[in-house]
Image (cartoon, helix red, strand yellow):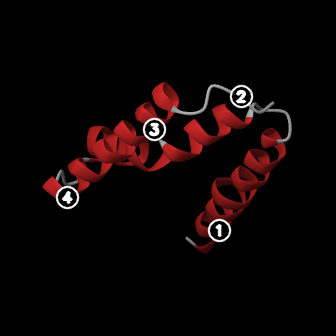
Amino acid sequence: MVCGYVFELIFGTILAYLVQIFAQKWSNPTHVMIILSVEGPSAFLFAWLFWGGSMQVFKVSGALFIIIAVMITEWFGASERVD
């Protein structure tokens, strides 16, 4: 059982974090912002779909606010892109 926790710690957390940081070097900053902003709502959605997570009004409204904020930022944000 302890080996499972150590495996999850190394591969599910530490390695995933290092790959994410490593991949950000070569990604467009706009794409990185979108991916990191939608990480919370997508985690909520996958937990609800695959593991029967609870769907509460506050969770759904928070996820919608995040997605709407990202969409507004992309549609009405500055026209100058940083690469």
Residue 79: percent from left, percent from top: 63, 25
Q: Tell me the number on the disc at residue 3.
A: 1
Residue indicated by mark 4: 58
Q: Residue at x 22, y 49 (%)?
A: 61
Residue indicated by mark 3: 70
Task: Report the amino acid beneath label 2.
Answer: Arg
- State which tag comes first along the sequence, 4 or 1: 1
Residue 69 is left or right of residue 27, and the answer is left
- State which tag comes first along the sequence, 2 or 3: 3
Tell me if label 4 and label 3 are in contact, CB under 8 Å: no
As rendered, which of 17 and 27 lies closer to the eye? Answer: 27
**SS type, badge 3:** helix
- State which tag comes first along the sequence, 3 or 1: 1
Circle 2 packing at 10 Å, graded few (<14), some (14-19), many (20+), is: few
Could you give the CA–CA distance between mark 2 and mark 4, rounded to whole angstroms? 33 Å
**Is 83 rendered above or below residue 19?**
above
Could you give the CA–CA distance between mark 2 and mark 1, rounded to whole angstroms? 46 Å
Task: Report the amino acid beneath label 4.
Answer: Phe
**SS type, badge 2:** loop
